[in-house]
Image: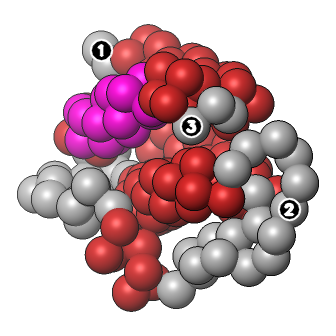
Amino acid sequence: MYNMKIEIGITRKNTQEVAYKLTKIPADEYVLYTRTRNAHWNITGPDFYDKHKFFETQFEQLDQFIDDVAERVRLLGHYAPAALRSFFELTQLTEMTSEKNDSHGYIKELLSDHASIIISLRKNIHPFAVDQKDADTSAFITGLMGKHEKMVWFLRSRIH
């Protein structure tokens, strides 16, 4: 996982710990991205068009999150995971389980996934800043958490 020596005022041990924890984030984001794209592709019902477009906006945001986290891992001198096998080994999320392809079912599941990611991000804010002495990564994941919270707000507003 370690790529090169970097000098940014954080010990090698601390960048390794941060990078390892960060590699779990793109895995979660990628699974959530795939689940959101699934909802986009397979949504049915009278609200099809509205939800189809809505899920498209959401998966495009998630795609950017994946890229941002991978770039943060690289900035720390490590490689970001990019294989599906790696993602499945690192993620805390599971594949979609909806029996119906309606918006309520998809939104409920996506809300649960976002909540899992938000909780996981929140748990690392303090350790990154204090234990690993990496205030920038702490601020980065705080911002990412806020973006997920906004996505949750938009999802919740779509439940009838």
Magenta-highlighted residues: 108-125
Q: Disc 2 marks which amino acid? A: Ile
Near-viewer residue (158 or 110): 110
- Give whichever of 117, 61 is nearer the camera: 117
| Cα gap from disc 2 to disc 3, whole angstroms | 15 Å
Task: Specify the quadrant of the image occupied by residue 134.
Answer: top right
Q: Identify the secondary structure beneath mark 3.
A: loop
Which residue in the structure is indicated by mark 2?
6
Q: Nearer the viewer, residue 85 or 37?
A: 85
Give, as a three-letter code, the residue at label 1.
His
- Residue type beneath disc 3: Gln
The picture places residue 125, in percent across and down from the top left corner, at 51, 24
- The C terminus sits in image quarter: top left
Which residue bears the numbered disc 1?
160
Mark 2 crowd level (few <14, some 14–19, many ≥20, 10 Å Cα) = some
Position of residue 121 measured from the top left corner of the image (x, y, whole percent)? 45, 32
